[in-house]
Image (cartoon, rainbow, N blue to C red):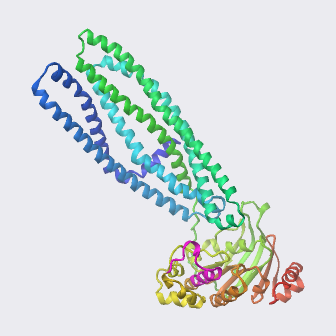
Amino acid sequence: MKKEILKRLLSYLKPYWKRILFSIFCMVAIGALSALAAYLVKPALDDIFISKNKKMLYLLPIAIMLTYFFKGLFTYLQGYQTHYIAEKVLFNIRNQLFENILYLPVKYFDITHSGDLTSRLLNDTEQVQDSIANVIPGMIREGFKAISLLVVLYIDNWKLALVATAVLPLATYPIVHFGRTMKKIGRKRQLSIAGLTTKMQEALTNLKLIKAFSTEKKEFEEFEKKSDELLNIKLEAIKIDEATSPLMEFIGSIGVAFLIWIGGYIVFEGMLTVGGFFSFLAALFMLYRPIRILAKSNNKINSSLASVERIFEIIDSQKEKYEGKIEFKGVKDKIEFEHVYFSYEDDNNKAALKDINLTIKAKSVVALVGESGGGKTTILELIPRFYDPTSGRILIDGIDLREFDLKSLRRKIAIVSQRVLLFAKTVKENIAYGREDLTMDDIVKAAKDAYAHEFIMKLKNGYDTNLGEQGVILSGGERQRIAIARAIVKDPDILIMDEATSALDLESEQIVQKALNNLMKNRTVIMAAHRISTALSADKIVVVRNGTILGEGKHKELLERCEYYRKLYKLQLADDSSL
């Protein structure tokens, strides 16, 4: 699994192979120059301090300066190249991830919190970027250093080199063991970050509700608990990460201890010069640093693999099906539901809709009435294919919905619901959303038809006023009229209204209803009506309860034939003078 993930991650690096090759060349140069720096210790001691060679006194300092100058130059070039590659890969992965999220089916978001997706978009991708920019290049660079220094060791004295490197196999156990543990901790950490992000988003979104119920302390305690969970996971990772270096140093000290003992004896016997020994010792000490870094980098790589897996989980998730080929141009005759069952859990035993049979004629108005949770909204959401029936089918003019091109279908459908969704953009941008071809005259005309122009002109910057998050500066009725104007410029063939006025006061409802009347002209309209008074003008009223249709017809017909409708009517009669 690890190899497959790494192989897939490397595929993102393919377009930058020239930069990668240049970066590797720089790493090789850095490794060679590091080894040269260690090797220069020998002539510095033997030729200058012991043999007192004046010529070397002038040449060696220049050689050392040049060595470190070019080492610094190649380090800079390699660092820039790897960070450039990492940022480009992060750019591509994050864009692909966000694009895939946008094309996931609505059903996916029913079971996945936006906080988790936000965490994957930001935190997980940052982990991957750090690995590509710092960890992986660091491992390669330090690997070349280690190889170059090993060469110096064996050139200086292969017998001492054998003694010094005999302990290296001992170092593989903590590297492998800690690496596996860090991968598990890495996944736990990313899940914990997602949970914390989710909690934070929920609290900020529902801040007014929290204040209304005075539950600040409770919300803080829940946040603190999740924050404490993340802290403990991070501390667990720190324990392992910080234990790696001392353990590697202790293992290295075993080799150094034997080396000094044996090396001292060889120097005493005249078999090795003092400069040769100290050059060897310098190379050895320089060798243990890259080995220590390699061990810590292995921990980080394994921790980052958890982030890579979480990213690929989203990228590999099944997108919405766009298999339809027929362009949808509008309803000419009728929309039909034929024995439609639907379950959010793909289980007809827990069906939200059961054996729905319904005909909606073109350019007619059909109102769905019934208690909340009865299935009205679910019926509406099947028409733009936010969900597909578990069984049965929905036809438009005899053609199954799934045979239509999904984009062309949704392009001809407008939705006005109780919960108005607006962007933190200007008024004109919200009205023209999805219609970049509109002129300002088109936008103003739609606003006037939606009875929104008057209050828009009273805003600070008129149509250029930024509405803030979810149109926070507007009242409920004003937000609804902006949404209606947006639906008008879309010029839909099918209009879906999901209790569009149920959350408004009477005065706002009357204005919004006028706007809706303009929107409904010459369109096929399917609405979920909270109040029966809203449904009275419909061509057909459909009574929905517990996922089934109990009756359909005009108001007077249903009063005579449908006991449940009669009950609803009596319950609302006392509260609604229009009945």
- Image point (54%, 74%), residue name: 468
In this rendering, would 111 be left or right of 325?
Answer: right
Can residue 166 be seen at all in this image of the molecule?
no
> What is the x, y in percent for residue 183?
54, 40
Height in image: 236 above or below 514?
above
> What is the x, y in percent for residue 91?
43, 58
Q: Name the outermost residue toward the top.
A: 269
- Image point (55%, 58%), residue name: 118
Q: Is residue 294 magenta?
A: no
Height in image: 248 above or below 140?
above
- Dominant secondary structure of the residues highlighted in magenta in the image: helix
Quadrant housing residue 487: bottom right
In this rendering, would 91 be left or right of 1?
Answer: left
Quadrant housing residue 27: top left
- Image point (16%, 30%), residue name: 60
- Image point (68%, 56%), residue name: 217
The foreground one among 332 and 24 is: 24
Quadrant housing residue 297: top left
Q: Is residue 470 magenta?
A: yes
Count the marks: 0
Q: Quadrant of the C terminus?
A: bottom right
Q: Which residues are magenta?
A: 465-487
